[in-house]
Image (cartoon, rainbow, N blue to C red):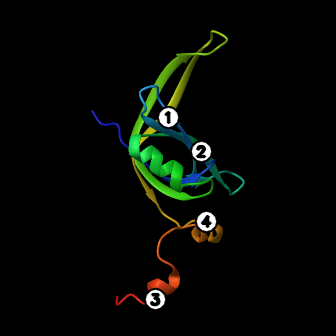
Amino acid sequence: MLNRIVLVGRLAQDPELRYTTNGIAVANFSLAVERPLMNQAGEREVDFIDIVTWRKLAENCANNLQKGRLVALQGRLQIRSYEANDGSKRRVSEVVADEVRFLDWPNKAERDEYSGPAEEEMDDLPF
């Protein structure tokens, strides 16, 4: 059996990081992914797909990604059921990502907060 999903899209919201009662990090966010075909109005429709990441990957996503950032990810589709507070049964479809690649740079304000080497220091590097 095979359950593998590859998506490229932009974050529709900032990742929400929380921890389980056992201290395991989990981050949730929504990814906006354009459909490959245009609709009758000549526009591309967008699917908003719920994404879940765990452990170190969850912390990396929460600490480095914000709404609007472009990412590629791989994972598996998970469909789970739960009972809502009102007693109704609900089903949730989500992608549990095991790899997330950042495809763009943060905006200038976010780059200014980056604690890596300054651009002037980078110019002095021999390569």
Verify CB contact (< 8 Å) between mark 2 and mark 4: no
Verify CB contact (< 8 Å) between mark 1 and mark 2: no
For marks 3 and 1, give the CA distance.
Answer: 44 Å
Q: Quadrant of the C terminus?
A: bottom left
- Neighbours of disc 1 within 10 Å: few (<14), some (14-19), many (20+): some
Ranked by sequence position, the earlier of labels 3 and 1 is: 1
- Amino acid type at circle 1 is Glu
Residue under numbered circle 2: 47
Residue under numbered circle 3: 123
For marks 4 and 1, give the CA distance.
Answer: 29 Å
Ranked by sequence position, the earlier of labels 1 and 2 is: 2
Q: Nearer the viewer, residue 78 or 44?
A: 78
Which residue corresponds to the image point at 42% horizontal and 34% vertical from the top-left? 24
Depicted 21 relative to depicted 55: above or below: above
Residue under numbered circle 4: 110
Residue under numbered circle 1: 94
Q: Position of residue 94 (x, y in %)?
A: 49, 34
For marks 3 and 4, give the CA distance.
Answer: 21 Å
